[in-house]
Every structure is written in C-alpha cells, then in structure tokens.
Amino acid sequence: MSRVEGPFVEGLRCRECARTYPAEALHVCDFCFGPLEVSYDYEAIASSISREKIAAGPLTIWRYADLLPAQPTAPVDLGAGFTPLVRAERLAAELGLGELWIKNDTLNPTGSFKDRVVSVALTKARELGFKVAACASTGNLANSVAAHAAHSGMESYVFIPHDLEAGKVVTTAVYGGHLIAVDGNYDDVNRLCAELASEQPTWAFVNVNVRTYYAEGSKTLAFEVAEQLGWQAPDHVVVPIASGSQLTKIHKGFSELAKVGLLDEEPSVRISGAQAQGCSPVATAFHDGVDFIKPQRPSTIAKSLAIGNPADGYYALDVVRSTGGSIGSVTDDEIVDGIRLLARTEGIFAETAGGVTIATLAKLAAEGVVRPDERVVAYVTGLGLKTIEAVSPFVGPTATIAPTLDAFNEVLEAEENAN
Ligand SMILES: *Cc1c(COP(=O)(O)O)cnc(C)c1O
Ligand SMILES: [Zn+2]
C-alpha cells in the first residue's frame, strides 16, 4: 500500500509503549499489541489553523481538516457533521439542571454519528489504495459504510449480527453492497472480521485495520461543540459507550483545541459515560473500582451499544476517572422513558442509544453527579426512526374516530373532562 500522509500527521504511536510507526494501515503495536494512535505536529497545526479559517470552511467535519488524519482535497463526504447544538431548557427544567445542551447527531446523512468516523476512515482508505470498504457493525456503522461506499464507488462488505432491528437492515441493504448477517452477537461478528482482515489485506475494515484513522473522526464531536458554544468548552459531557472509542476521542478533541490555540486555556471537561444495564462492562468496572473490563454477553434493546468486550473500554474508564466523571447504566424500561422524555420535552426523536444517554443523564442529575451549576452537553448519537420497535408498543394515536365533527367533539369533551 502506498503511503500518503494527512496534512499534519507525524505518524502512529503505540498508546502503551510509545513506539512509533508510519501512517499506514496498522492498528496494533508489533511489540506489545497496544492500540495505535495518530500523532500530529501540533506546532505546525497551531500556525495553520484559526477560528476564522474554520469558519470559512465547509459546514461538515472537514472544516477541521487540519486536525484530521486524511487529505481533505477529495474526501469521501456525504455531509457528515456540523449538526445542531440545541439548548434544552424544557428537559433541563425536568431534570433540575441549569444550562443543558443536546448535540443532535441524529441529523447526520445516515442518521448517526458513525458518518463522522466513516467519512474519515474511507477517505484515508482510498488514499492508502483500498478498493473495498468493510466493517463489523452493531447497525449504525453498517448504514454509514454502505452509504459512503456507494457514494464513492467502492465495493462494500458489511457484517452484522443476524438479529438487528429491521430499520437498520433495510437502511443498509438499500445501498446495494454486500450485507452479511452472521448467526452470532456483535463480539462474534467482530472476531470474524478480525480474522477476515488478515485474510483479505486489500479490504479496509473501517473498525479493524483502519480503526486508528476511523476513531479520529469522533474528535469532531468536541470541536463542533466548542465552536458552537463560541469557542468555549462545556463543564460536563455525557457520552454513550459501546467500544468506548467515541468517549476517548471527545476527550482528545477538547485537549487538542487548547494545544493548537483555539481555546484560551486547557479545558477541564468532566466526561461521563452511559451504558445499558444489559451490556454494561465499562460501567461495572467503574463501580467496582477495577481496571479490568470483564466481558459480558449483551441482552438489551440498545443494540447499537451492545458490545460485550469493548476494545477501548479500558481507555474510556481512564478518561472518566481522570476527568472526575462517572458512568451510569440504565434498564430497558428507563431507555424507553429516556427516548420519550427527550421527544416530549425537546422534539428530538432518538434511537435507543439516545435513550441510554438521556436516562443516564437523568440518573446522574438525580445523584448530584451532573450539577445545575455546570454547562452540560448530552451527545444524542442516533435517529429514532431506525429503532421504532423500542417505542411502538407504548405510543400511538391518542384517539381513533369516525370522520365527523361530532366524533371529534366527543373526544375533545372527554379530554377536557379528564383534565
Ligand atoms: C456506535 C455507536 C455509539 C458508540 O460508539 P463507540 O465509539 O463504539 O463507543 C454510540 N451511539 C450510537 C448511536 C452508535 O451507533
Ligand atoms: Zn507498543
């Protein structure tokens, strides 16, 4: 594979032993098997980047190209990023919080934050000469890889657990790539893809052999929030955890902004995590006060977060502990309540992962961990239309009537009497 650097990429560095590697399709250290991380020339970035240059850029993640690991000249781009940051006064009032914001990442091209990571991963994959896009997915990544591959003319192989929500299967299959349903859970699918990645060296598995680049896309969740707050960092953010990658990269994103001079001081953002109780390996380790993440067999309606053996769990735990955050977990019933609460108070319909975030936010607020004097951002990462089976048993028409005025007036009267 040829070697093409991102604009300011120095190379890759092992997170454990700090050995360095060229910016190729590598993801683990040859010596200690630690994960690799992209390293940048921050001094050069600081002299290139500015708030004005960013403001003049595209309304996508590519406005932060100086801090991304791929060349922005011909990105694989469906318009991911620059999603609304919505002030949530009504939700804040219900939860007893003060300044609360929702980062509404349901409004990405395929309805989840995965479009950010896939746009970066496939741009890099194309630079490196890969022709086939592939992934192991809990659902949203499948949608996003299939769509971005279709847009860029790459062939795609997408691997999913066989029991995903219909909304996620259809919204992947429609793009016309290869969609392989595997008789197993996500961790089985991921193991299969790790084996396949060595069998098929010309395939870019976005979350396996190009994972190092993929993960960097999540930093834009921090960049955008800071820019949308007028180049200020929030005090506390709540982030859903599947593999834990997104949470660690939001942390990296905020500290990079200070490193390159876009924030006036080193931000101290408390980072809290959210998991479903039916798949809560990182929350469990947090509460047990241990470093070791014991794998679980997932059983939850939050399928997009159902990773029982999270690749970045250890690092997510470390970020949460070092920033003074917490990790909460919520039941399936609480997830449904969280989805409905966000919809009812803010007009935003999230998928189950969003329900996990909002229900966990409610719990942490009730415990006094998320405080009313903090400026808080909750990351709502996926669209409710893809998981309607989670709420469809609980909502429907408030009345069904004959097409007459009388029939409707009866309903009105009954409702008035009930109040
Ligand atoms: C994948 C996913 C996450 C979590 O991502 P990780 O980086 O694996 O922790 C959160 N929300 C949604 C909607 C997702 O699809
Ligand atoms: Zn190493």
Image (cartoon, rainbow, N blue to C red):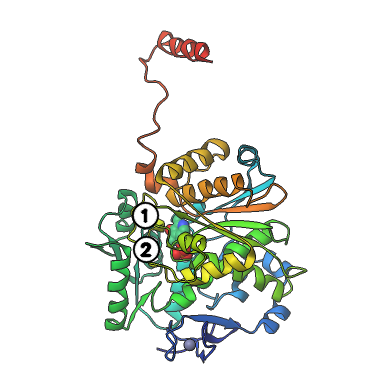
| Pick the front one: 228 or 62 | 228
The answer to whether residue 75 is left or right of residue 160 is right
Q: Is residue 265 above or below residue 418?
A: below
The answer to whether residue 234 is left or right of residue 221 is right
Q: Is residue 179 above or below residue 395?
A: below
Q: Position of residue 14 (x, y in %)?
A: 51, 85
Amino acid type of the residue tagged 2 in the rendering: Gly
Q: Is residue 246 above or below residue 208?
A: above
Residue occupying image coordinates x 25% and y 58%: 162
Residue occupying image coordinates x 70% and y 76%: 259
Q: Position of residue 321 (x, y in %)?
A: 59, 66
- Quarter holding the N terminus is bottom left
Q: Which mark is residue 308?
A: 2
| Pick the front one: 163 or 10 | 163
Displayed quadrant of residue 219: bottom right
Q: Position of residue 390 (x, y in %)?
A: 37, 43
SS state under label 2? loop
What residue would you read off at disc 1? 303
SS state under label 1? helix
Q: Is residue 106 above or below residue 245?
A: above
| Pick the front one: 167 or 331 | 331
Q: CA distance from mark 2 to mark 1?
A: 11 Å
Q: Is residue 19 visible?
A: yes
Q: Which mark is residue 330?
A: none
**Residue, far top:** 406
Q: Position of residue 78 (x, y in %)?
A: 47, 62
Displayed quadrant of residue 248: bottom right
Pointer 2 local density, CA inside 10 Å: few below 14, some 14–19, many at least 20: many
- Quarter holding the C terminus is top right
Displayed quadrant of residue 324: bottom right
Amino acid type of the residue tagged 1 in the rendering: Lys
The tag earlier along the polypeptide, 2 or 1, is 1
